[in-house]
Image (cartoon, coloured by chain):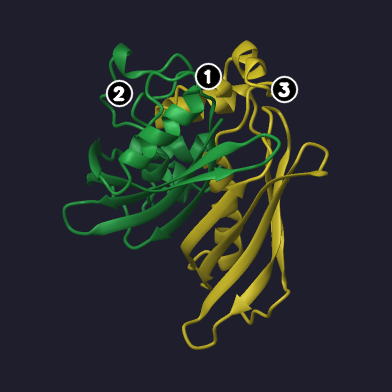
Amino acid sequence: MSAWEVAEERARAVIGRPDHRDLGVVRAEDAAEFARAAGETSPRLTDPGHPGFSVHPLYVVSLLRGAGGAGQGEFRPDGMYRDEVPGTDGLDVRLMAGGQEVRFTGEVRAGDRIAVRRVLTDVARKGSDAPFLLLTVEKTYTAERSTLVRVRERFIVR
Amino acid sequence: MRVHTGQPVPPVEFTPDTVTLLRFGAVTRNAHRIHYDTGFARSEGLDGPVVMAQLHGCLMHRAAMSFAGRDGQVLEVEWQNRAPALAGERLVVSGTVGAVDPVSGRVTLDLVEHGGRGDVVCCRGRAVVLMG
């Protein structure tokens, strides 16, 4: 069985099984740096001292880990986190992002502690000449007061 | 502001270079080598380090926010990656108004991101906004 097929089998086995991740507390300075790195120039996104400052809406959904980062053993040789793409830990497969659908249901604020619930919801074979797996992961981001963002994210595994 | 179907979404652009990708990867804690390691990226069949998906999303979001106006709101944004964008390429997101719901006020924008010399579609997407 190829690595690609092992990934598919493993992924299908965890469909519907949720996991949870703590992304830590949102710092205005980090959100502002995110906005600057994304090319934003409005002080409402880039200057934490601005009276109208707000956290960039895509900041927390772009975070792969909180400020604590990760230990050396948590990375794949390609630099991705071992548990980021379901079923691929330890396998020599190529990973790419396929896209996202993001629905905002609340405003992220500096000081919010963000938790994310992740569930693999679909595994599909795609392509003909160059087949690949398309994994769909649904994520729900919450702060203590409410749900903030819902995301459907797709990963390509070759 | 009155909005109608087919109305153009004014383009927004960004040219993320290798420094941009390093900064963006650092702040999001994204260490995937395809974004900064040229040799590794080529071993994966890419022409060089490529732009992160979330950075494409940010440009889609900016186009939507710019259209919605200062007091507008982006309710949803989505994008599909169609072709990789290399570090240093100029990216331009443009689009048109796809639908207007007169009851809810929700405006759906059909968006596309072109890269390179403008002949490569890097992403297609849509956004739902409320106008300011």
Residue nearer the viewer, A56 or A19:
A19
Question: Which residue is drawn at the image coordinates 23% and 44% (left, top)?
Answer: A115
Can the viewer see residue A57 in this picture?
no
Both on one chain, marks 2 and 1? no
Comparing labels 2 and 3, the label whose residue is closer to the camera:
3
Which residue is the site of mark 1?
Answer: B33
Residue A128, percent from left and from top? 68, 41
Which residue is the site of mark 2?
Answer: A69
Question: Which residue is drawn at the image coordinates 66% and 59% (left, top)?
Answer: B111
Both on one chain, marks 2 and 3? no
Q: CA distance from mark 2 to mark 1?
A: 16 Å
Q: Amino acid at mark 2?
A: Gly
N-terminal-most mark, 1 or 3? 1
Q: CA distance from mark 2 to mark 3?
A: 29 Å
Residue B38 left/right relative to A122: right
Residue A155 left/right relative to A117: right
Residue nearer the viewer, B15 or A11:
A11
Can the viewer see residue B44 in this picture?
yes
Where on the picture, by quarter, is residue A24? top left
Where on the picture, by quarter, is residue B46? top right
Q: Secondary structure at mark 1?
A: helix
Q: Is residue A27 above or below residue B86?
A: below
Q: Secondary structure at mark 2?
A: loop
Q: CA distance from mark 1 to mark 3?
A: 13 Å
Q: Colour of chain B?
A: yellow
Q: Secondary structure at mark 3?
A: loop
**Which chain is disc 2 placed on?**
A
Comparing labels 2 and 1, the label whose residue is closer to the camera:
1
Which residue is the site of mark 3?
Answer: B47
Where's the C terminus of chain A, which quadrant?
Answer: top right
Near mark 1 (Cα within 10 A), the count class, few <14, some 14-19 or many ≥20, is some
